[in-house]
Amino acid sequence: MSKAPHPKPTDSELEILHVLWQHGPATVRAINDHLSQRRQAEVGYTTTLKILQLMLEKALVRRDDADRSHVYRAAVREQETQGLLLDKFVDATFGGSALKLVMQALGSRQTSADELAQIRRLLNDIEIQNSTPNSDDDDHA
């Protein structure tokens, strides 16, 4: 049973999701304080509250009403959200080509030896995964 993908969060919603992913469930006040620290500028409490209410309607967050202070938690996983945003970005910017994305990313900045080693390991893992026969194929004999 596959769930429909969640809606793409706006930049402000994504910023709140980052706070929740890093720090876990939090009140509006705590989220607002984290946002103010990240931006190094005061963020309006009512602005944060309004964005959280919109995120609740979009099912990006859940709210615990048990206490006087409502506690919000992310309703979407970080990795799934990153995948959704990356897929949309690659489609819109690079015509769906992962190769063009990687070439642009590696060609536009200095890549450390450690990063290159990690990329090689990832490529090796993907190559091994792609060359391993699928067990489902063996069952159709």
Image (spheres, rainbow, N blue to C red):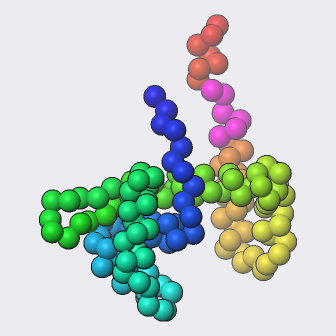
Residue 97 placed where, x, y %? 81, 51
Identify which residue is drawn at 28% across, 72% down: 27
Decide which of 112, 24 is in the foreground and name it.
24
Decide which of 126, 19 is in the foreground and name it.
19
Image-based side of 91 in relation to 50, left or right: right
Image-based side of 123 in relation to 95, left or right: left
Q: Is residue 66 visible?
A: yes
Residue 124 placed where, x, y %? 70, 51
Q: Where, by quadrant of the figure, is residue 25 drawn?
A: bottom left
Q: Where, by quadrant of the figure, is residue 77 drawn?
A: bottom left
Identify which residue is drawn at 71% across, 35% down: 131
Identify which residue is drawn at 63% across, 26% down: 134
Residue 113 placed where, x, y %? 72, 75
Specify the farthest residue to the top. 141
Q: Quadrant of the C terminus?
A: top right
Q: Which residues are magenta?
A: 129-134
- Would residue 102 be counted in the magenta stretch? no
Q: Is residue 76 above or below residue 40?
A: above
Q: Is residue 83 above or below residue 4?
A: below
Image-based side of 11 in relation to 132, left or right: left
Q: Is residue 98 visible?
A: no
Identify which residue is drawn at 40% across, 69% down: 50
